[in-house]
Image (cartoon, grey):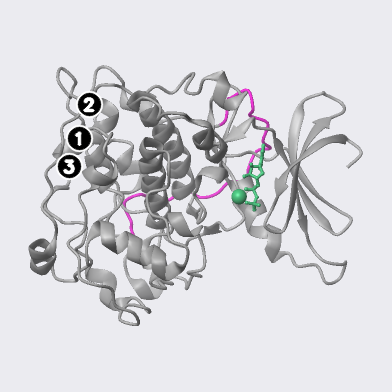
């Protein structure tokens, strides 16, 4: 610990505290997260072990890296690069929403980091604005892997055709492949080799899945299956959270706000409509959408391959075949509702942005696009193209 000089406290962690500190040998700023572990001999490793394992396994420009870790006086210490701000603070400082090109850029960077986590078979389980760090140069970093865990099956097979021949303005390699860490903040130690998941071998049988806690993800960003007590969910809970964050970037306030878990569910149902396990019933009971066409014209922009992929318009968001298996469905009923068009909830989003949001904000986890698939969504290929540099003015992050 005497390698670092603490400058200030950044916040209280769930199990400890986070400090801003200076590394004495180099003068660089670092963040030190301390986790109380209990007395020697009675150490509770569960409080930090998953976070450590995830950080060691991940190596990506848009995912937090670890400088070093050690135990010190009944505390486990994570030393990480220091970041100037987080998305929660930045959203709260914004007088007006950022232009859509910048919202696209932020979303792209979040999804690149998330796709890396999922392809390493790590589910984050607490994606929210305060866990998304922002560097002085505007890079976006997924952080706080305290609730993360490894899954024993890979993310869903990638449905889209590879667009190698379809896009001229931004090549898919530029959009998707951020590669390993090479940013100025990149200081992580090499992670242990982890076998690369085969994207083509999705394990769908529920009895091969581990039972997971449903008490994860901060409420506003918690997916409906978690709110209904699912213990067999998958990577798509993180995708729901990203959908909530993208909508929040347009609105500058959270999309679904509930003071209790029941109120949260009520808020989601009021928006998406009463869910039905039967497709025809779902269609019959869902509010008619009349997409607005504000901004975001796709004129003169090459068509993304996603638009030729799965048919994303035929399934209404209130179709939820898996709901019959959820532990808490039926324990409480809500008034019947047809829901509200997403266009009304996120009024300043373009037509393509709304279509993009609809791929994430659906009840059925199997209908939710994966992080990899979303990276190929036509939103990222349509005007205005994503801006991934100089996203934030100094007034927001300095
Ligand atoms: N590397 C970092 N650089 C700057 N601030 C950080 C860093 N890591 C965490 N923080 C700040 O501390 C807060 C809490 O850290 P986090 O890892 O999310 O712990 P927890 O949510 O478990 O309390 C974050 O929301 C962020 O504001
Ligand atoms: Mg946190």
Kind of element beneath mark 3:
loop
Kind of element beneath mark 1:
helix
Crowd band around label 2 with a 10 angstrom C-alpha radius: few (<14), some (14–19), many (20+): some
Instruction: Report the Cα–Cα distance between label 3 and label 2.
Output: 21 Å
Q: Is the CB of the residue bearing disc 3 within 8 angstroms of ligand 2?
A: no
Is 321 magenta? The answer is: no
**Marks 3, 1: nearer the viewer:** 1
Apparent side of residue 65 relative to residue 264 in the rendered image (left or right): right
Q: Nearer the viewer, residue 24 or 161?
A: 24
Label ID, residue 309: 3
Instruction: Report the Cα–Cα distance between label 3 and label 1.
Output: 18 Å
Disc on the earlier residue, 1 or 2: 2
Apparent side of residue 71 relative to residue 283 in the rendered image (left or right): right
Label ID, residue 351: 1
Q: At 56% across and 45% down in the image, what residue appears?
A: 131
Q: At 28% across and 63% down in the image, what residue appears?
A: 269
Q: Are marks 1 and 2 in contact (CB under 8 Å)?
A: yes
Q: Nearer the viewer, residue 385 or 208?
A: 385
Asked if 328 appears above or below 255 in the picture, the reply is below
Quadrant occupied by the N terminus: top right
Residue 207 in the image: state x and y as whole percent: 38, 76
Q: Magenta part of the protein: which range?
A: 181-202
Q: Which residue is mark 2?
A: 296
């Amino acid at each position: 610990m005497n390698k670092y000089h603490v400058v200030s406290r950044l916040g209280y962690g769930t199990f400890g505290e986070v400090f801003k500190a200076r590394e004495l040998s180099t003068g660089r700023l670092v963040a030190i997260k301390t986790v109380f572990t209990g007395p020697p001999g009675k150490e509770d490793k569960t409080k930090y072990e998953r976070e450590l394992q995830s950080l060691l396994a991940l190596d990506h420009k848009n995912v937090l890296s670890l400088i070093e870790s050690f135990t010190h006086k009944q505390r486990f210490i994570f030393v990480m690069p220091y970041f100037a701000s987080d998305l929660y603070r930045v959203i709260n400082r914004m007088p007006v929403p950022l232009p859509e090109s910048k919202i696209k850029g932020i979303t792209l960077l979040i999804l690149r980091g998330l796709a890396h986590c999922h392809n390493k078979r790590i589910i984050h389980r607490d994606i929210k604005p305060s866990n998304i760090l922002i560097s002085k140069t505007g890079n976006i970093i997924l952080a706080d892997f305290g609730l993360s865990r490894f899954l024993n099956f890979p993310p869903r097979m990638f449905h889209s055709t590879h667009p190698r021949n379809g896009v001229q303005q931004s090549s898919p390699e530029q959009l998707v492949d951020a590669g390993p860490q090479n940013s100025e903040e990149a200081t992580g130690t090499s992670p242990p080799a982890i076998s690369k998941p085969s994207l083509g071998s999705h394990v769908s049988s529920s009895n091969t899945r581990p039972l997971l806690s449903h008490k994860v993800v901060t409420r506003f960003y918690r997916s409906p299956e978690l709110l209904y007590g699912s213990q067999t969910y998958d990577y798509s809970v993180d995708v729901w959270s990203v959908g909530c964050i993208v909508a929040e970037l347009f609105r500058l306030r959270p999309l679904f706000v509930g003071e209790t878990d029941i109120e949260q569910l009520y808020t989601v149902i009021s928006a998406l409509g009463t869910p039905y396990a039967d497709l025809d019933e779902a269609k019959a009971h869902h509010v008619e959408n009349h997409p607005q066409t504000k901004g975001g014209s796709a004129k003169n922009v090459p068509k993304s391959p996603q638009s030729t992929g799965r048919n994303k318009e035929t399934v209404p968001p209130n179709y939820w075949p898996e709901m019959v298996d959820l532990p808490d469905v039926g324990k409480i009923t809500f008034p019947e509702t047809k829901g509200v068009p997403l266009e009304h909830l996120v009024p300043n989003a373009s037509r393509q942005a709304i279509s993009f949001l609809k791929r994430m904000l659906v009840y059925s986890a199997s209908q939710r696009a994966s992080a990899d698939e979303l990276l190929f969504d036509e939103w990222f290929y349509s005007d205005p193209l994503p801006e991934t540099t100089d996203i934030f003015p100094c007034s927001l992050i300095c």
